[in-house]
Amino acid sequence: MQSTTRLFDDNSRKALADAPLQQALGKLSSNFTVKRALAAARLPEFEALRDQARDIKDHVLAHLDIYLERFEANVVAQGGVVHWCRDADEARATVLAICHEAGARTATKSKSMITEEIALNDHLEANGIEPIETDLGEYIIQLRHEHPSHLIAPAIHLNKNQVEATFRAAHTDLPPGRNLEEPRSLLEEARAKLRRRFLDADVGITGANMLIAETGSIVTVTNEGNADLTMTLPRVHIAIASIEKIVPTLEDATTLLRVLARSATGQENSVYTTFATGSRRTDDADGPSAFHVVLLDGGRSSLIGGAFQDMLRCIRCGACLNHCPVYGAIGGHAYGWVYSGPIGSVLTPGLIGIAEAAKLPGASTLCGRCEAVCPVRIPLPRLLRQWREKEFEQGLQSKTARFGLGLWAFLARRPQLYRAVVGVVMRILGRLARRHGSFYNLPFAAGWTADRELPAPEGRTFIDQWRARAGGHR
């Protein structure tokens, strides 16, 4: 996927002015966040499970080579093939070679952020193979030639009327006067369109929520069952995953599953949680005759053992996006690459470089809600601050920002001067706002005051008040 992270500021302004998008984003506060809180409250051991999930992922990252080799050995023992890919080019070439070997003309796909990361659909189309997204949200945005805007709800940026218009424009073989007023009618139309594509597909491509070293299995988690049809109906199944998705045992996988669905959609369990192991055996009723696992590094191994290793604990639940005030205001496309929200602002610089993604670590209020809800306790605010430090060290900030930070640092190292300057500024602001008591479009702070009211200072500074109160208690 082509990165537009350098255009984050422009993307954000467009998103804030997009009325349908703003309406669609309202679903976050009334849906995912409420359901996640209720699901966590119903499980007394939820916080302890978060600790266990964190420890499992930390253990895996400390012994990643061992578990990846064990996973490969067990995949091979079950009749599968593992392909090791250093980057997106190798991953795309590997998938294409498998499709060509199978004589594929079409390939059904279940939702996979890794295939977005390597821009697989474009590559397959350019080489004469039609990719067919089978997740409802992914199917909708494929018709619209868009990318996912959310980790688990790829079409959350759209409303029902937009989806209806998309279906009428794409499904021109159906009666133009058909009723698409109800969401169920949209669902039934998509199901009817996809049913034949499932049956005719030559290759099925899925992601994997987890890879289990103990058994060589992959785990997929969906609410639609499309991943099951994608991996069982075609002759060839290709599972694509990044190397950090490994877990040691089946028991570890079930621990992570207990926090995954609750954190993502507020469900006790997703509707379909499927463990797939190898190709079809002689006594199996269904399944592919060939099973391939494509493992992508994509820059992740360079993060192991470093300051940003913790980000590799992510299990792609989307909870940090659902609770982030910045994501809730601008949506996912503004971030300009595959991963959005707080995890995207941390992961993207690690995968494509801070020079390309320098705007993203600043796309946060550092309120801490993302860390508070993360099922594997990734310290996202700390990692965002570390990326900001990298950005400053490499001189990637604007001259205005560097000047402002330099001025603040100069004053902060001189407390008496700092307090004197702050006191003068507060008095000036207080007098300027005497009539209204607040500011809009304040000079040098337009980014904060163009769309929100900034209360004017009242009275003395905190330090002055503290000193007065402390003196009165002596």
Image: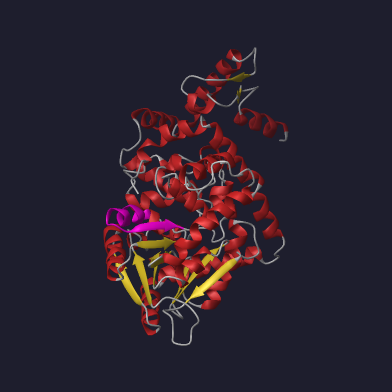
Residue 35 visible in the displayed image: yes
Q: Tell me if residue 59 comes above or below residue 401 in the rendering.
A: below
Q: Quadrant of residue 179?
A: top right
Which residue shows up at 40% across the image and 82% down it?
Answer: 74
Q: Which residues are magenta?
A: 117-133
Q: Nearer the viewer, residue 295 or 468?
A: 295
Q: Quadrant of residue 113?
A: bottom left
Question: Which quadrant is the C terminus positioned in?
Answer: top right
Q: Nearer the viewer, residue 403 or 201?
A: 201
Q: Quadrant of residue 356?
A: top left
Direction bottom: furthest residue: 283
Q: Is residue 238 left or right of residue 177?
A: left
Q: Is residue 267 left or right of residue 91?
A: right
Which residue shows up at 51% across the image and 42% down it?
Answer: 168
Look at the image and name its color scheme: secondary structure
Residue 453 spot, x, y in % from top left: 60, 24
Residue 90 spot, x, y in % from top left: 27, 62
Q: Tell me if residue 24 comes above or below residue 47 in the rendering.
A: above
Residue 326 spot, x, y in % from top left: 53, 40
The reply to whether the magenta stretch includes residue 247 is: no
Residue 409 spot, x, y in % from top left: 42, 33
Q: Is residue 461 left or right of residue 64?
A: right
The reply to whether the magenta stretch includes residue 131 is: yes
Q: Tell me if residue 414 comes above or below residue 114 in the rendering.
A: above
Q: Is residue 154 left or right of residue 76?
A: right
